[in-house]
Amino acid sequence: MREQDYRRLLGERAWQPERVAEAAAARKRRPLRNSREQLLIIAADHPARGSLGVAGDPMAMHSRKDLLDRLMTALARPGVDGLLATPDIVEDLLLLGALEDKIVIGSMNRGGLHGSVFEFDDRFTAYDADSIAAMGYDGGKMLCRIAPEDGATAATLASCGDAVTKLARHGLMAMVEPFWSSRRDGVVRHDLSPEAVIRSVSVGQALGATSAHTWLKLPVVPDMERVMESTTLPVLLLGGDSSQDSDEMFGSWSNALRLPGVRGLVVGRTLLYPPGGDVVAAVDTALSLLEGA
């Protein structure tokens, strides 16, 4: 990102707030389905939950200018389909002109802040269905952590179900990211056994008054074939931990992308902050896996 573009962004943010709506209205849109059967969507909604760490660096994502530069680099690669992010990041990229001909998925519930005592009380603090529709975006994503021993789960399930219903009324994708979770030693942990992921799928796909527009965002786990047998809904695979061995991670993605019902990848920090820092190479590797599948 050129310094003059960054300075212009700062000026528009301060003195021309109407530019956000204008940029959204003028943005060139595209169909959800393109020439390829599978999608690559870049995710950037972790900062809104106060989760800024990457591969052992707890403040790796502290610089918004650096994050935007990485996002613009990733989104500019031929074959990258779109972005998943909160309003602040989406609107920065709108003003920078980086979302032309891209899918845009708005991240909705970011209230369950990372490490907080209320993490399972995952309030909808960002987009809602009406604002996503009004801005001309393509869908909304919700995190749905299911903790049977935590009473806050009931409110999260109800809120997610309501969001699925309202997005469907607008004909928009509801991207549900379910996890079977618990709190151990004060830290929220996800159970990534095939059985637990299957349970989370069973709950997540039944949310809302209709599942006609519901997609699932799922981790790649052992015995992924069994997981995919638990749903007929379209599935997007989420990226692994940035500290994971790259070859092992890409290999697991490659195998999972070949399963029936898998429709692509939604990846954030793994591609934006790869080992060695080469965003272009990391994104192109992910794109090659989609082509291979």
Image (cartoon, rainbow, N blue to C red):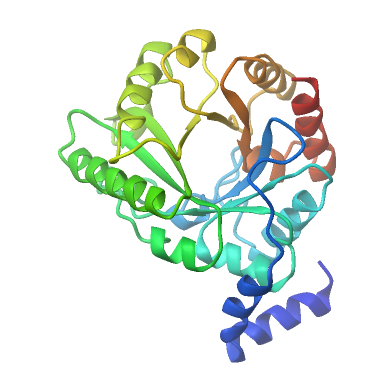
Q: Residue at x 34, y 35 (%)?
A: 188
Judged left or right of residue 198, residue 224 is right
Q: Is residue 80 above or below residue 125?
A: above
- Which quarter shows the C terminus? top right
Q: How many marks?
A: 0
Extreme residue toward the bottom, this view: 15
Q: In this view, does 19 lie above or below 256?
A: below
Q: Nearer the viewer, residue 270 or 19?
A: 19
Q: Residue at x 65, y 43 (%)?
A: 41
Q: Which residue is drawn at 61% across and 14% down?
A: 259
Query: How far across and how far down the image is residue 201, in percent?
Result: 38, 24
Q: Is residue 64 visible?
A: yes
Query: How far across and how far down the image is residue 73, in percent?
Result: 80, 53
Q: Is residue 109 visible?
A: no
- Which quarter shows the N terminus? bottom right
Q: Quadrant of residue 194?
A: top left
Judged left or right of residue 124, residue 127 is right
Q: Is residue 125 above or below residue 221?
A: below
Query: How far across and how far down the image is residue 8, in percent?
Result: 74, 82
Q: Which of 236 and 85 is in front in this view?
A: 236
Query: How far across and how far down the image is residue 29, in percent?
Result: 68, 59
Q: Nearer the viewer, residue 1 or 228?
A: 228
Q: Which residue is drawn at 66% across and 37% down?
A: 270
Judged left or right of residue 161, residue 76 is right
